[in-house]
């Protein structure tokens, strides 16, 4: 069933059992599979595929070439008791993969009213992205990884299975959070975290190698880690010293910016 207000590109393929709501826009070569529900006010970019039995609600804007597997729930109302039916949004970039039973909720009026997801992220089975989260690009969320509300995640971050992030938490670029870890404070860029509650256990050197960091850059990151975690300096003292190091090694600027912005404190 397709609502008369829906605008569907002539090259899109919509299964006869799919339900398409009001004011839906479907781009070129989109595939909407059997028993899929696309609710009101959803925009789907070119080449995106909803395989079957998926639910996509709005107001939501989905970019191009995303792949949404069966039983995923994307753009649903949030699980916040303060939510009272306000108009809130979900924005998703390009080339993301949402596996079975993954869920993403729209924002709340108490924040910016929007949940944002970048591009090329992988959300494995049962992963959950709560309201008002902001996620960068090229991240991996393993099975059952869970973000509470208002969490901000950088780029190239990896979460092991069954990880959990406290609300308003932050995780910086290139960080690695091990399986079953629980983060109740911010995890800086480049840092590997493990345990419950999570503690720093080193730098994500293997990930940095894979992303083209030079040996000299990785060594700079390692030295910054030692300043932050092994020098017995206060956070303010460590931040000042790392900022000085960043003057000659720009890759550390992302760590400096992250430390300057932390409000909850960092794992130590």
Image (tube, rainbow, N blue to C red):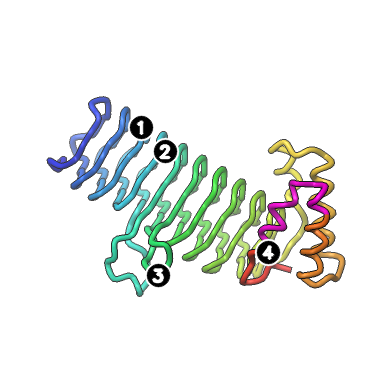
Mark 3 Cα-neighbour bin, 10 Å: few <14, some 14–19, many ≥20: few
> Along the line of sight, which residue is nearer the eye, 196 or 47?
47
Q: Which residue is mark 4?
A: 260
Give how far apart the Cα atoms at labels 4 and 3 are.
Answer: 24 Å
| Residue at the top extreme of this rendering | 11
| Residue occupying the point 56% across, 47% down | 140
Q: Are marks 1 and 3 in contact (CB under 8 Å)?
A: no
Q: Residue 267: x and y, percent? A: 69, 67
User: Which residues, given as a range, are shown in magenta?
Assistant: 245-259
Give how far apart the Cα atoms at labels 2 and 1 are.
Answer: 9 Å
Q: Main secondary structure of the magenta part?
A: helix
Can you tell which quarter of the image residue 16 is in? top left
Position of 2 compared to 247: left or right?
left
| Residue at the right extreme of this rendering | 231
Q: Quadrant of the N terminus?
A: top left
Give how far apart the Cα atoms at labels 1 and 4 are.
Answer: 39 Å
Q: Residue 163: x and y, percent? A: 57, 60
Position of 161 compared to 233: left or right?
left
Vertical order, 216 against 113 (above or below): above
Where residue 46 is drawn, which disc sits there? 1
Q: Which residue is mark 2?
A: 66
């Amino acid at each position: 069933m397709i609502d008369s207000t829906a605008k569907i590109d002539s090259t899109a393929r919509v299964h006869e059992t799919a339900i398409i709501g009001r004011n839906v826009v479907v781009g070129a070569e989109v595939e909407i599979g059997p028993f899929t529900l696309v609710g009101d006010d959803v925009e789907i970019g070119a080449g995106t595929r909803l395989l079957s039995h998926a639910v996509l609600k709005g107001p939501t804007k989905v970019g191009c070439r995303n792949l949404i597997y069966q039983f995923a729930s994307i753009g649903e109302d949030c699980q916040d008791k303060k939510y009272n039916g306000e108009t809130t949004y979900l924005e998703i970039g390009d080339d993301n993969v949402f596996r079975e039973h993954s869920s993403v909720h729209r924002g709340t009026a108490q924040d910016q009213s929007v949940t944002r997801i970048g591009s090329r992220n992988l959300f494995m089975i049962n992963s959950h992205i709560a309201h008002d989260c902001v996620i960068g690009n090229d991240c991996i969320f393993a099975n059952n990884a869970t973000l509470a509300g208002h969490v901000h995640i950088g780029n190239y971050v990896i979460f092991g299975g069954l990880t959990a992030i406290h609300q308003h938490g932050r995780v910086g670029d290139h960080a690695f959070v091990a399986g079953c870890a629980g983060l109740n404070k911010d995890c800086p860029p480049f840092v590997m975290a493990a345990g419950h509650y999570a503690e720093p256990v080193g730098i994500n050197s293997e990930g940095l190698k894979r992303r083209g960091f030079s040996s000299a850059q990785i060594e700079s990151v390692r030295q910054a880690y030692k300043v932050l975690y092994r020098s017995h300096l206060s956070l303010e003292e460590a931040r000042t010293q790392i900022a000085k190091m960043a003057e000659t090694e720009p890759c550390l600027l992302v760590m400096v910016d992250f430390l300057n912005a932390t409000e909850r404190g960092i794992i130590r």
